[in-house]
Image (cartoon, rainbow, N blue to C red):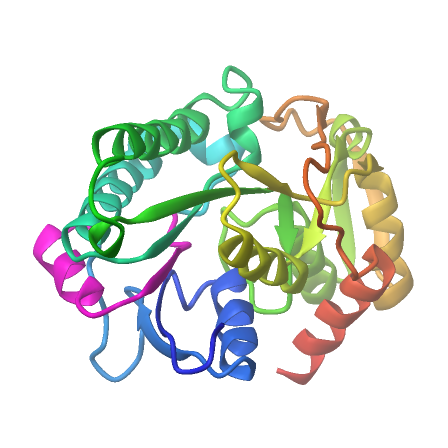
Amino acid sequence: MWKNKKVLVTGSEGMIGKELVIQLEGLGADILLADLKVPFGGATDLTNYKECIDVCEDIEYIFHLAGVKGNPKKTKERPVDFMGPMLQFDTNMILAAQEEGVKRFLYTSSIAVENPESDKYPAWAKQTAETLIEAMRIQYKDVPKEYKTNYCIVRPSNVYGRFDNFDNPDAMVVTSLINKAMKDGNLILDEKGCEQFRDFINAKDVARGMIKAMEDMPDKPVNLCSGEEVQIAVIIKLIMNNTGCSTEFRNLNLTLGPNKKVMKINWDFKPEISLEKGIKEVIEWNLKH
């Protein structure tokens, strides 16, 4: 299916994007990268509709991963910085794909959609794009097959991986904890935050799930998750075991999300990388690089 297919990956320089590109290259796909950070002058501004049209030209499949990194603190204090660009480039890419006759389009949504009031701004940014895809399916249902774009939607849970930006102050929980442990040798932790539960998945598994979703093209959004409740305290213990860092527990009055953000596996997909293996790999990668 993938041999010599012309595939566009937006957000190609991100944690999941890099893993996806590696796997697609292994399958023989002909890949075009679209990201603000693509080296050698190849950067693409997806908030510019003309640039979205240009990158979609002659493309058969699109993996739309481009997004704005956020956490509860950022989305509470700077929601426009999250929502504004997201709404712009999601809308641009969805419309440009249809205009250029792209055959298949995968949209990367979020776990936040499942509980929108607990993580309001990320949830509604992603939900808006999902709703636009629903509208595209209605309006273009009678378009001839050769001109019609088919869409699928994936919702990753809390993702971690070796290619994340460990200097990003808005990094997600696993990346943030590993970064602090490796830099400082000591984790100062919020007591309440450590008691929370999350659903974690490695970026390699997310990329594998995205490729499967593009092959299957499910009609309904599918969850890329482990389906398991994991307390933050477990993550901390794994990081301690692999870095030798120490810990201190305090009441830091942090901006926290809901106590539990856990998804259910709702299709034929299961992750292959355990938390123990994944976290160890991320720490070893950072030590080498």
* Above or below for 276 versus 236: below
Residue 62 or residue 245, whichever sits in front: 62
Q: x, y (%) of residue 152?
A: 45, 44
Q: Residue at x 49, y 37 (%)?
A: 219
Residue 172 or residue 67, whichever sits in front: 67
Tell me if 232 is positioned left or right of 203 in this view: right
Q: Is residue 14 magenta?
A: no
- Residue at the far top in the pictured view: 117
* Above or below for 199 versus 204: above
Q: Residue at x 37, y 77 (%)?
A: 31
Q: x, y (%) of residue 48?
A: 12, 52
Residue 151 or residue 154, whichever sits in front: 151
Q: x, y (%) of residue 251?
A: 74, 26
In the rendered image, the quadrant that contains the C terminus is bottom right
Q: Residue at x 75, y 76 (%)?
A: 284
Q: x, y (%) of residue 194?
A: 79, 34
Tell me if 19 is positioned left or right of 109 in this view: right
Tell me if 266 is positioned left or right of 87 in this view: right
Q: Residue at x 19, y 59 (%)?
A: 45
Magenta range: 47-67
* Above or below for 268 versus 186: above
Q: Is residue 165 visible?
A: no
Task: Using the rendered view, name the quadrant where residue 191 is placed.
Answer: top right
Tell me if 70 is positioned left or right of 213 in this view: left
